[in-house]
Amino acid sequence: MKTKLRIFIWSGFCPDYANGLAFAIAKDETEARKLIEKEKGYEVDEWGSLEIRPVSYRVARCVSGGG
């Protein structure tokens, strides 16, 4: 059986002066978090809000930052 992938999108990710955005395409949330922490190079403290979508269709999301 083929594992279905999903896109995990965190808005409000690692906020400092403005909210960040992170995403990963993975089989589950644990794998997604590990992929992001590997990319970032350290353990993440503030993840923000999570949205999970199937990857069976085209999708686009963006977040504008502010200063």
Image (tube, rainbow, N blue to C red):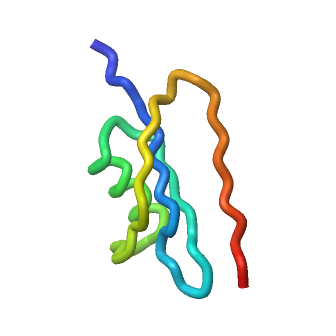
22 is higher (above) or lower (below) than 9:
below
Q: Nearer the viewer, residue 40 or 53?
A: 53
- Left or right of 49? Residue 18 is right
Q: Nearer the viewer, residue 39 or 30?
A: 30
Q: Position of residue 60 (x, y in %)?
A: 66, 41
Displayed quadrant of residue 42: bottom left
Q: Residue at x 39, y 64 (%)?
A: 37
Count of numbered badges drawn on the protein: 0
- Image quarter in which the C terminus is found: bottom right
Q: Residue at x 60, y 87 (%)?
A: 17
Q: Position of residue 7 (x, y in %)?
A: 47, 40
42 is higher (above) or lower (below) than 10:
below
Displayed quadrant of residue 58: top right
20 is higher (above) or lower (below) than 11:
below
Q: Residue at x 49, y 51 (%)?
A: 9
- Left or right of 19? Residue 28 is left
Q: Position of residue 24 (x, y in %)?
A: 47, 48
